[in-house]
Amino acid sequence: MHCAVIFGPDTHGGLRNLHCLYTEQGCLQIKNLLGHLRLGDRIGQQIANTLSILQLTTGTSKSILCDTEHPMPHLPTGWLTSIRDFLQHIGGEIAIPGCLSLSLPCLNDRLLMDIFHQDTSLSPASVQKINHCHLYLQVTCLADICSSDGSAMLADAFHGRPLSDSTS
């Protein structure tokens, strides 16, 4: 089609008033997400719980809807990950107060998945396997798998056995 027709008025067959459907869908999803969270209804509470579970599952310190520039191949796919992908596409983020944020129990401690996210040599499949290990062992930070003085890794954690003092 000639550019004059494409950018012409819609009364003459121009296409300039067409909207990007991906953007329309993403904006509608964000509107629904924020609407339910702000309303605090039952659906909003379930969304907040799901966000907290996803945050715990990813094992990272940054919210999954705030840190959209780093890929998270271990994040389960669904509606919230679709919103995360859209936020990544537009360079946006959503900070939701009250959702679970992982904290560190000790000074100089680090979250395990934050460490592995910094390693760019790991493939997405490796990150997924490491995440499965962290979920199986029910650990989130270095202090969970190290001795009390921090000098060695616990034998059970090293051999992939659940730790006796770790509870979900």
Image: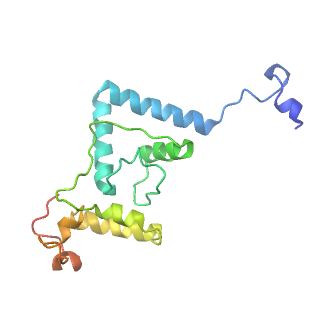
Location of the N terminus by quadrant is top right
Residue occupying the point 14% across, 63% down: 166
Residue 23, compared with residue 111, is above or below; it is: above
x then y, percent, for residue 91 = 53, 43
Q: Using the image as rendered, state which of residue 11 and residue 143 is in the foreground.
A: 143
Residue 125, compared with residue 50, is above or below; it is: below
Q: Using the image as rendered, state which of residue 51 and residue 148 is in the foreground.
A: 148
x then y, percent, for residue 150 = 17, 72
Residue occupying the point 28% across, 30% down: 42
Residue 73 appears left or right of 51: right
Location of the C terminus by quadrant is bottom left
Residue 101 appears left or right of 105: right
User: Residue 146 lies in what quarter of the image?
Assistant: bottom left
Q: Residue furthest front?
A: 108
Residue 120 appears left or right of 46: right
x then y, percent, for residue 18 = 71, 30
Residue occupying the point 44% across, 43% down: 79
x then y, percent, for residue 31 = 46, 29
User: Residue 110 lies in what quarter of the image?
Assistant: bottom left
